[in-house]
């Protein structure tokens, strides 16, 4: 699909990966609608795009709310007349050990129900609503399109992230399930794929404890955080390459987990 002239809807578009994809697609001639709970961030991304000569607008709301997601999609339709690209990217993490045992051998803390539910709500229910409300409009209006979801390398299972890893592991299944359903019903002009980033240089990771960050980087073959632009270029490649469908592409800089495991 051509990026130039297409209409893109991006959740989590106020920051990090979503903001980078929004800016790069707008640079390529797409009309962009960014959604997020962070209005200040949305305004600043839209201002940056329009000042550079691109087209963009925003819709404030949570991906966990049906009405907010519908409003986001309707904004794209009313402003730009179509939806061709949906990036279900909004995500959060609330890390803790599921069962944390202290030196006496007794349980010290557990992951709270709230921490589990909130992460499932944003990462899974949010992606569910975003894709459903985007794809139903694409089909009913005959708009060709591409859907991309943001999974994570930690979808393979990371201690301290039972909630987050569970959501990303589930998302890894979705391109095959959804593309399979579209194929069953003869919908051939909508593709769905995902990216699974490794550790990326977005505000969350840049602000973390530098010692912990250095330990993480020993697991990464390229020895550095990956850049949002490296994820954005992968998203653009998925949009433009019709052969990429029903799959998830890892972009990690070579996360191996080996060295740190052996050092323990
Ligand atoms: N940064 C990384 O290293 C990394 C690695 C793997 C996967 N990811 C995934 O990439 C995606 C983007 O993360 P990022 O690194 O750009 O983080 P980020 O925090 O910079 O951006 C996430 C955005 O999602 C928004 N958001 C949170 N809850 C929302 C809600 N309920 N409704 C709408 N928007 C909401 C936030 O306000 C924020 O602007 C997430 O799904 C994350 O899990 C990130």
Image (cartoon, rainbow, N blue to C red):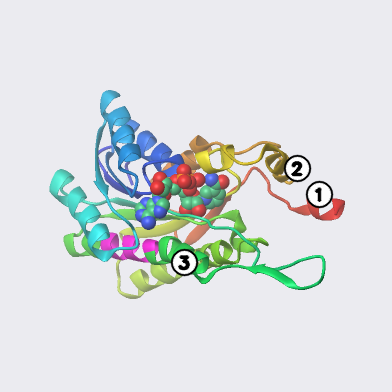
Residue linked to disc 1: 259
The front one of 67 and 169 is 67
What range is drawn magenta here? 126-135
> Residue 64: percent from the left, percent from the top?
34, 62
**Residue 198 visible to the viewer:** yes
- Whole-angstrom CA distance, mark 3 to mark 2, is 29 Å
Figure label count: 3
From the image, state whether disc 3 or disc 2 is nearer to you: 3
Residue linked to disc 2: 218
Checking the image for residue 120, the label placed there is 3
Q: Is residue 161 above or below residue 44?
A: below
Q: Is residue 129 left or right of residue 231?
A: left
Mark 1: which secondary structure? helix
Q: Residue at x 64, y 64 (%)?
A: 157
| Residue 108 placement: quadrant | bottom right
Mark 2: which secondary structure? loop
Label 1: how many Cα within 10 Å (few below 14, some 14–19, many 20+): few
Q: Is mark 2 within 8 Å of ligand 1?
A: no
Looking at this rendering, what residue extends furthest in the top direction? 52
Q: Residue at x 13, y 49 (%)?
A: 78
Q: Is residue 56 left or right of residue 244?
A: left
Q: Is mark 1 within 8 Å of ligand 1?
A: no
Sequence order check, earlier mark of 1 and 3: 3
- Whole-angstrom CA distance, mark 1 to mark 3, is 31 Å
- Whole-angstrom CA distance, mark 2 to mark 1, is 7 Å
Q: Are marks 2 and 1 in contact (CB under 8 Å)?
A: yes
**Residue 237 visible to the viewer:** no
């Amino acid at each position: 699909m051509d990026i130039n002239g297409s209409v893109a809807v991006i959740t989590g578009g106020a920051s990090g990966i979503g903001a980078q994809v929004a800016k790069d697609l707008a640079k390529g001639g797409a009309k962009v609608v960014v959604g997020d709970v962070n209005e200040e961030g949305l305004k600043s991304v839209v201002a940056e795009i329009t000042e550079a000569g691109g087209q963009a607008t925003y819709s404030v709301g949570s991906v966990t709310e049906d009405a907010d997601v519908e409003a986001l999609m309707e904004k794209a339709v009313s402003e730009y007349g179509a939806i061709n690209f949906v990036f279900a990217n909004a995500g959060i993490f609330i890390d803790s050990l599921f069962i944390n045992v202290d030196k006496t051998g007794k349980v010290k803390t557990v992951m709270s129900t709230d921490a589990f539910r909130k992460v499932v709500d944003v990462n899974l229910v949010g992606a569910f609503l975003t894709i459903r409300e985007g794809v139903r409009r694409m089909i009913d209006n005959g708009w060709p399109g591409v859907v991309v979801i943001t999974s994570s390398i930690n979808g393979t299972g990371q201690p301290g992230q039972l909630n987050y890893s569970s959501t990303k592991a589930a998302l890894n299944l979705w391109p095959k399930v959804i593309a399979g359903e579209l194929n069953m019903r003869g919908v051939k002009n909508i593709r769905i794929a995902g990216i699974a980033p490794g550790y990326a240089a977005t505000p969350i990771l840049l602000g973390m404890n530098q010692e912990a960050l250095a330990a993480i980087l020993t697991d990464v073959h390229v020895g550095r955080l990956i850049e949002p632009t490296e994820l954005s270029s992968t998203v653009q490649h998925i949009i433009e390459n019709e052969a990429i469908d029903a799959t998830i592409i890892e972009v990690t800089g070579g996360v191996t987990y080996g060295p740190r495991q052996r050092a323990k």
